[in-house]
Each structure stands twice: as structure tokens, then as C-alpha cells.
Image (tube, helix red, strand yellow):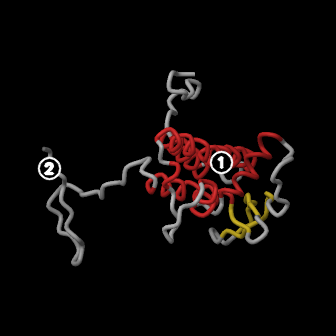
Amino acid sequence: MSEDGRTDKTFFIRTPADLLEKLHWEANALWRAQPFDLQQRAYMVMNCAITAWQMKDWVYNTLEASGHLDNLVDCSGQHIDFDAYIKDAIPQIMVARQIATASKHQIIKCHNDPTVWTTVRPVHIELRGGYLRNELFVVDGRESMLAHELVQQLYIQWKKVLHDLGLIPKEEPFVPDGDMQLPHGTPRLRRKRSQ
């Protein structure tokens, strides 16, 4: 362990932004995986769920170390605790928790939610005359969603949370080089001038 208490056992991952990049990499690998290899894709979904669930600890520890943990407010401006903030900002986090805990420990002894489960179902693909293909689904009692869409939502929601908490900078809009005419109504974006 380093002097500031951070782990020195995670290679290049040192911040929540680094862990978000790992989740992004895992989600992209899942998206590019062969659709017929359900076992490989299931492993990837479990890894993504573990990363998304562990992000909570990384963000909490970072906010606590910086003294910003007590500055969390909900959409109405009321101060709320960290768990309530994350559950509100990332509705699927509890689904990720169920998958992550089950994949790490096999049995969920605390906080088991029997309305959450994973399954494989056939879906009809409208391509080349149409055919059936099995897909990974996550069911949370209220809805059923494709596993890769769950992972995508977890990434998008975590990225927004890290932006909102100031743990990653807001992205600058891309301005292409060249003299290409912009479509009517497109706002003009200027590059920041170096100081």
C-alpha cells in the first residue's frame, strides 16, 4: 500500500476515471464479441458487472479523501447520503451488484434480490431472411433487458456521475479542421486559444 493509502496492486488503475476506462474497454470487448459465443459473452458481462459495482467503492473513497463526500445533493437540492445518490443516479447499480456478488461468491447471503436473474432467450434477427439467435438477458423483476445493453447503460450512467462529481473533466466538443461548409443552423464552435 502506498503512503496515501491507495493500493499499489492495480497496475495502471489509480482513480475512478481509470476504472471507468476499464469498464469502457470491457463494454467495447463485449460489444465486439462473437454473438454465437454465449459463454465468452457471459464472462464479459460478469466482469463488467464487477467493475461497475466496484466503481462505487472507488468513487466513495475518492470523495472521502477529498472531503467532498458530504456535498452530495439530489435533483431537488437536498443533501443525501452516498448510497442514495448512487442508487438515484444509476438505477441499474443494484442489478450489477447482484450479478457481481453472485459471480464472485456463488451464493448471495446478504442483500439477495430474488427478482434479479440472468437467462438465455432466443431472439429473432431480421437479416438474410430472418433467423433465431440466443442472447443473454438480465431480468430484474420489472423488465428484461439484453445483457450488453445493461452494461452500456452502466457505463453511460457512471460516466455522467463522474462528470457531475468533478472526477473527470467535461468533454470539449470536437471541431474538425478544414474549410468545409457547416449545415445551416449549426452552432459555431471555436478552438480554445493557447495562452
Amino acid type shown at disc 2: Arg
Instruction: Give residue 82's position: percent from left, percent from top.
Output: 59, 53
Q: Which residue is mark 1?
A: 53
Q: Quadrant of the C terminus?
A: top left
Question: Residue at horizontal 62%, vertical 55%?
Answer: 151
Asked whether the residues under the numbered discs 2 and 1 touch, taking CB atoms below 8 Å apart as contact, a structural biologist would say no
Instruction: Give residue 179's position: percent from left, percent from top.
Output: 14, 61
Question: Residue at horizontal 23%, vertical 71%?
Answer: 187
Helix, strand, or loop for circle 2?
A: loop
Q: Quadrant of the N terminus?
A: top right
Of pointers 2 and 1, the one earlier in the residue sequence: 1
- Which residue occupies the foreground of this view, 174 or 61? 61
The CA distance from mark 2 to mark 1 is 40 Å
- Which residue occupies the foreground of this view, 55 or 132? 55
Question: Residue at horizontal 66%, vertical 56%?
Answer: 93
Total residue callouts: 2
Amino acid type shown at disc 1: Trp
- Which residue occupies the foreground of this view, 82 or 183? 82
Instruction: Give residue 26's position: percent from left, percent from top.
Output: 58, 44
Q: Residues within 10 Å of mark 1 (few under 14, many from 20)?
A: many
Question: Residue at horizontal 46%, vertical 41%?
Answer: 66
- Whether residue 46 is situated above or below residue 8 in the rendered picture: below
Q: Which mark is residue 81?
A: none
Q: Quadrant of residue 163?
A: bottom left
Q: Residues within 10 Å of mark 2 (few under 14, many from 20)?
A: few
Instruction: Give residue 180's position: percent from left, percent from top.
Output: 18, 64
Helix, strand, or loop for circle 1?
A: helix
Q: Which mark is residue 193?
A: 2
Query: Looking at the image, which residue sits at the far bottom?
Result: 184
